[in-house]
Amino acid sequence: ELEGKARYQQDQLARLTERLVAAESDDITKRLPIIKKMLGLDNLMEENTQLTTRVNELQRQLEEERAAKAQLTSEISTLSREQQRLEEWAGSVAAAQTPPPRGASAEHSGQAPAERAAAAD
């Protein structure tokens, strides 16, 4: 009979312990939002999310700007080479169209003395 009572009390103690653990767990779960609010964690978590979003947006913009800068640098380089080529071409055209000055030596005029004499006649 004593064993039966002891077993009964142990069972009751086990059930009460389970209920107590469940109640404490529920209590903590219910109190967690209150605790977070008291500590300001909800606001901090929201602010952290907003800041993370903003940082990601700024990083994306920076990458776009770097790509645009690289594109512009490439275009500037291409245009610079084209400008140099055109300046060289313009110089050679101008040199070809400029007649030699009067009385220039044969080496400057590109004509032999006999050709100059024939041209003068």
Image (tube, helix red, strand yellow):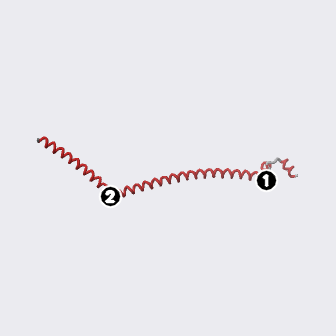
Residue closer to the observer: 57 or 105: 57
Of all residues, the one furthest to the right in this rendering is 121
Residue at 79% x, 54% y: name it: 101
Residue at 16% x, 42% y: name it: 7
* Total marks in image: 2
Find the distance from the CA under tag 2 to the CA under tag 1: 92 Å
Provide residue 39's location: percent of width, then percent of height.
Answer: 32, 57
Residue at 67% x, 50% y: name it: 85
Question: Relative to residue 109, is residue 83 drawn left or right?
Answer: left
Question: Relative to residue 69, is residue 114 drawn left or right?
Answer: right
Provide residue 45's location: percent of width, then percent of height.
Answer: 37, 55
* Above or below for 46 versus 115: below
Disc 1 residue crowd, few under 14, some 14–19, many 20+, Cα 10 Å: few
Residue closer to the observer: 19 or 76: 19
Residue at 35% x, 56% y: name it: 42
Q: Kindly identify which residue carries mark 2.
A: 37
Provide residue 29's location: percent of width, then percent of height.
Answer: 29, 52
Question: Relative to residue 97, is residue 30 drawn left or right?
Answer: left
- Tell me the mark number nearer the camera, choosing from 2 and 1: 2
Of all residues, the one furthest to the left in this rendering is 1
Q: Kindly identify which residue carries mark 1.
A: 99
Disc 2 residue crowd, few under 14, some 14–19, many 20+, Cα 10 Å: few
Q: Quadrant of the N terminus?
A: top left
Q: Earlier in the sequence, mark 2 or mark 1?
A: 2
Q: Under tag 2, what secondary structure? A: helix
Name the amino acid type tagged 1.
Pro
Provide residue 4's location: percent of width, then percent of height.
Answer: 14, 41
Name the amino acid type tagged 2.
Lys
